[in-house]
Image (cartoon, rainbow, N blue to C red):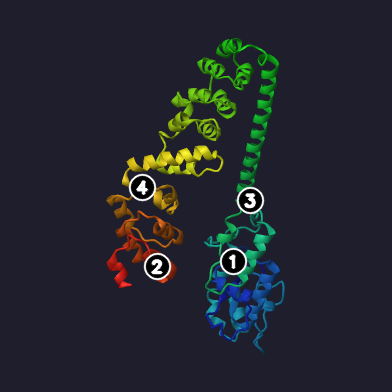
Amino acid sequence: MKTVRPKPLGAGTENLHLSAEEDFVLARIDGQLTVRDLVALTGIDEPRVEQIVSKLAAEGAVTLEGAEASSDYLPDVGSGPSLPSDGETTSLADFAAALGMDPSAFAAGESKKRAAVEAPVHEERVESRSNYPPPATSEFPEPMPEPLPDVLTKAAHEELIELGPGDEAPTDELIEVGTGDEVANEAEAAADAEENEEAAVLKEQDYRKIYEARFHALPVDARVGLAKLAHGADLLALCLDADSRVIAGILENATTGLQHVRLIAFHHRTGVGLEMVTRRQDFLRDLLVERRLLRNPMSGDTVLGRVLATKRLFQTYKIAIDRDVPELTRSKSRGHMRKKYQSAPSEERADLVLRTEGRCLIYMTGCAFDAKMTQILCGKPYNSVLFIQNLAKFSATPPALLAHLMKQPFVRKHAPLKKLLLQHPNMPGEVKRQQ
């Protein structure tokens, strides 16, 4: 039955009582595929495919061709010439006689058919859009690829059964198999980061022990001299010193690097020592040094000014609302943000308002919108409730922008927003009269 090649008869299938699975197999029969090919193409078990092909032949939907086709798979046509029994060769003339047709029309090409059957057959590879490999061309089929997980295979098989004759098997659900590996890699990276932080804390504790054992009892001048010449663990231990003169000696040491500066920025508690760190721009460019300086409660105005000098307006806003930064530093950052706002270009101002959805306007008391910034904001549609509310509550919102907001379809459908905008003192009178 494996080499039997079913061929559709072209009759309509409306009167046939076929299940979805049988209809799916019938749609793949084109007269060129054998039963073995149908098994590989549809992914259905071979006994089930043979049973479906036999039923289709009995219903008269297909006819069977091939070396193994016998009377067991042909429809019952009543009385007539019987086909040869098992073990004998069945020719086209025998089939024609069994079906009540004239066998002489097939007798002429009988010898050619037998020669073609005995000759080695090179079957064409049938292209398919499904996930299964093409049918094998030898008696021993090629090994199938490793199956997907049971859950995915079962779901895909159920979807295949529910398809109609002209539908195709979906493959999108079977592509994202490696997402679990990505999640595992992210979890491993997070675990490695935690381990690194724990290792850093343990090392700092070791440096603290070295400092208490070797340097704490020494006078300040001795510690300063050692800071200029020490290296390795001794220099890292001296970074925990509380005296700013020792910090100055460490910064003069030729072996001082980012690891030493990071310890100073995190543990040192004098404004003079932190100010010495910010004198070198190569240290300030390190993100960890910058973050530790901002989170250090002893960072003064000079340190904050040097850190924020190269920051854009939006980056300054992020520092001003960072909960990990002390409240005093955040308050000073808001003052720097207002100063930057006055001198920033219009495009940068508009970008800040758009990216924060107007949240930054709470800290912009006394600031105004220039003409170019207003033009940029008026050239965009809006459908954010929070953005429109923040602009409606900001006292310096220009009349042109308020009129533009009133024209938005989102505002027209939202009565509370419309009422809030009309209450703004800068709302043009013409717009109010039109409402």
Badge 1 marks a residue whose secondary structure is: helix
How many neighbours does mark 1 have within 10 angstroms: few (below 14), some (14-19), or many (20 or more)? few
First of labels 2, 3 by sequence position? 3
Q: Is residue 167 above or below residue 381?
A: below
Q: Are marks 2 and 4 in contact (CB under 8 Å)?
A: no
**Residue carrying label 1:** 117
Q: Residue at x 50, y 37 (%)?
A: 329
| Quadrant, the C terminus | bottom left
Residue type indicated by callout 2: Lys
Label 3 to label 1: alpha-carbon separation:
51 Å
- The span from disc 2 to disc 3 (Cα, nearest Å) is 48 Å
Which residue is denoted by mark 2 in the rendering? 418
Residue 244 located left or right of residue 409: right
Q: Which residue is mark 4?
A: 367
The nearer-to-camera label among 3 and 1 is 3
- Distance from disc 2 to disc 4, alpha carbons, whole Å, reads 24 Å
Tell which tag, 4 or 3, sits nearer the viewer: 4
Percent coordinates x, y for residue 132 in the rendering: 59, 60
